[in-house]
């Protein structure tokens, strides 16, 4: 169990770095540009790795690929749009703790649909995550309640997507292919939503912050490979919470690189640590 845990925590580090890069890019740009540029970089990284290391015969496993596609439409597809909007409106330090609630959903679905075991450790960890979310967002509940909906929505979609990914991996143990399909569907979803919403004109190759979004997308591409590999070797109830330690990485990185954009209050720090501690408790072997 050590290797999957290490892979999941490393993926969390890349997810945390991605959030910081997105937040930096949004300072002077917009979520629509961020979504498209990061999604393109995400697909590019995974496509290259796929062509180099995965036999094309995996494309014949159409049922598993369909499962991965559905997961990709939910998260990062729709979830990315909600998360980027949340990052712009309430910042990294409040978006992170709220999205850390996704293991509540993913673990519940894994128990109901995949037959995973629900232990006292999982229940306690879940309670700690909920408490952390409430503490982190307590001061903002009155003033930014509407904005918090975006992060909550992202958490729900990520939570639903995780057991779907695991089910697909049970059918086809090909983490890189799974990540590539997921990323491609997320890009198509982003293009569809942003195009239909009439916001595609906000995406320009002359965007001065494009580099931040592209690097963010590359980070997510690496995280996808690590995430899927870990998920192929362990249960959702273990990997899902460990992935949600990303906020602690984001919290540290935000103070190192974008402290002029983020205000880390005592409540945010305590809430993040509590939520992450709950995630780790759930995932501890």
Image (cartoon, grey):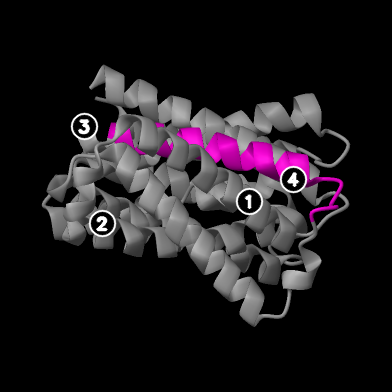
First along the sequence among labels 2 and 3:
2
- Residue 216 inside the magenta-drawn segment: yes
Mark 2 surroundings within 10 Å by alpha-carbon count, few (fewer than 14), some (14 through 19), many (20 or more): many
At label 3, counting other C-alpha atoms closer than 10 Å, the crowd grade (few under 14, some 14-19, many 20 or more) is some
Any mark on residue 233, and which? 3
The residue under the point 40% across, 53% down is 182
Label located before the other in sequence (1 or 3): 1
- The alpha-carbon separation of the residues under discs 1 and 3 comes to 29 Å
Residue drawn 56% across the image and 74% down it: 192
Q: What stretch of residues is rendered in magenta?
A: 205-230
Residue ID for mark 2: 65
Say whether residue 8 is magenta: no
Query: What kind of element bears circle 4?
Result: helix
Q: Is 249 rendered above or below residue 115? A: above
Q: Earlier in the sequence, mark 4 or mark 2?
A: 4
Q: Is residue 245 visible?
A: no
The disc at residue 236 is: none
Question: Residue at position x 48%, y 56% from top?
Answer: 76
Secondary structure under badge 1? helix
Q: Which residue is mark 4?
A: 23
First reached walking from the N terminus: tag 1 or tag 4: 4
Labelled pair 3, 4 in contact (Cβ < 8 Å): no
Quadrant of the frame with the N terminus: top left
**Residue 281 placement (x, y as % from top left):** 35, 31
| Residue 197 drawn at (x, y percent) | 67, 80
Find disc 1 in the rendering and name its residue: 95
Which residue does the image show at 33% across and 25% down from the upper left?
5
Tags 1 and 4 touching, CB below 8 Å: no
What is the spatial separation of the Cα atoms under label 4 and label 2, in whole angstroms? 32 Å
């Amino acid at each position: 169990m050590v290797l999957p845990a290490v892979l999941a925590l490393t993926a969390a580090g890349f997810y945390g770095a991605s959030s910081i890069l997105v937040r930096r890019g949004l300072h002077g740009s917009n979520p629509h540009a961020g979504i498209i540029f990061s999604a393109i970089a995400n697909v590019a990284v995974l496509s290259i790795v796929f062509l180099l290391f995965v036999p094309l015969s995996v494309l014949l496993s159409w049922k598993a690929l369909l499962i991965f596609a559905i997961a990709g439409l939910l998260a990062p597809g729709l979830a990315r749009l909600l998360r980027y909007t949340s990052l712009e409106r309430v910042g990294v330090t409040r978006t992170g703790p709220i999205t850390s609630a996704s293991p509540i959903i993913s673990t519940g679905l894994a128990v109901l649909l995949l037959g995973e075991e629900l232990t006292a450790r999982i229940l306690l960890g879940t309670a700690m995550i909920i408490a952390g979310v409430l503490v982190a967002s307590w001061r903002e509940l009155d003033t930014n309640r509407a904005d918090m909906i975006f992060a909550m929505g992202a958490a729900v979609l990520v939570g639903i997507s995780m057991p779907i990914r695991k089910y697909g991996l049970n059918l086809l143990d090909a983490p890189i292919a799974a990540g590539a399909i997921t990323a491609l569907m997320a890009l198509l979803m982003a293009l569809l939503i942003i195009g239909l919403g009439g916001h595609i004109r906000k995406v320009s190759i002359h965007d001065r912050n494009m580099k931040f979004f592209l690097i963010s997308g590359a980070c997510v591409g690496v995280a996808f490979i690590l995430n899927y590999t870990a998920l192929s070797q362990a249960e959702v109830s273990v990997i899902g919470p460990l992935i949600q330690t990303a906020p602690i990485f984001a919290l540290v990185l935000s103070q190192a690189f974008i402290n002029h954009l983020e205000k880390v209050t005592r409540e945010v720090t305590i809430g993040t640590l509590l939520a992450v501690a709950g995630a780790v408790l759930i995932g501890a072997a």
